[in-house]
Image: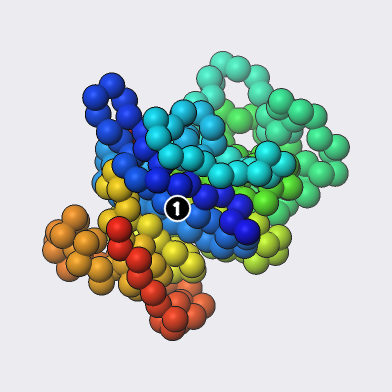
Amino acid sequence: MSLIATEDLQVTYGNRKVLDGVNVSVEPGEIVTLVGPNGSGKSTLVKAILGVVKPSGGRVHRDRTLRIGYVPQKLHIDASLPLTVARFLSLPRRHAADKTAAALARVGMAGLEKHQMSDLSGGQLQRVLLARALLTDPQILILDEPTQGLDQPGEAAFYELLEAVRRETGVAVFMVSHDLHVVMSTSDRVICLNHHICCQGTPKVVRNAPEYRALFGHGTHGALALYQHDHDHDHDHGDHQETDQDA
């Protein structure tokens, strides 16, 4: 069964329809990347899935016992606020020190417990946010543009980390990408959203889809530039497509 599924989801702000008839699902262990231009409804879809935004139509199917780990776009930490990484990871619920240490080690931040949150670089902060999400032993990670503000090496490193976490834990990943031209090549599916689903499929299918090219033009030949990985060739087989944008 799907971990999360939306059924003809609609969200309206005033007279403006932000999401219209959106059907998405995430299966156990799957990596799904959501792309779309600014104002396309990506963050609204995430909020609806999390239960923060109430749909004006359709439904979100999610088991009440589903464990979700959420990583936001960014987190502003007041530089004058004394907050260590260990203390941050204990909010709102305290975890055993060994579990906290294991989560930091898993994201490549071992020994960072006593560092101040305000002193972390952008890449370090995103890894700590991921560690916090992993402390709930999630069945699915939901990440809303987690690499925004990172340079290309930092972005690639974060994607590589997500791949490793999925490989080691089997957690499913539903990620919103801010960069239409850089998508994890190991995504099982890419969904292109512009208030409705324009197209979806493997990264290779989406980068060649007429709907994607019509939406984003031919400045880059209408192609998604994939984050290259040793297993990129695994996605050259079994491609499929189903055709049907953040407020």
* Between 30 and 5, the one nearer to me in the picture: 5
Helix, strand or loop at disc 1? loop
Q: Specify the quadrant that holds the N terminus.
A: bottom right
* Between 124 and 41, the one nearer to me in the picture: 41
Query: Where does residue 83 sit, x and y in percent of width and height?
Result: 66, 23
Q: Specify the quadrant that holds the C terminus.
A: top left
Can residue 13 be seen here? The reply is yes
Residue 86, placed above or below residue 133: above
Circle 1 residues within 10 Å: few <14, some 14–19, many ≥20: some
For this view, does 3 lie left or right of residue 181? Answer: right
Colour setting:
rainbow
Query: Where does residue 135 sit, x and y in percent of width and height?
Result: 73, 42
Residue drawn at point x = 56 percent, y = 49 percent? 4
Residue drawn at point x = 59 percent, y = 56 percent? 2
Residue drawn at point x = 40 percent, y = 35 percent? 57
Residue 209, placed above or below residue 152: below
Can residue 123 be seen here? The reply is no
For this view, does 204 lie left or right of residue 233? Answer: left
**Residue 9: quarter of image:** top left
* Between 118 and 197, the one nearer to me in the picture: 197
Q: Which residue is mark 1?
A: 24
**Residue 241: quarter of image:** bottom left
Q: Residue furthest top?
A: 80
For this view, does 167 lie left or right of residue 36? Answer: right
Q: Amino acid at mark 1?
A: Val
Residue 17, placed above or below residue 141: above
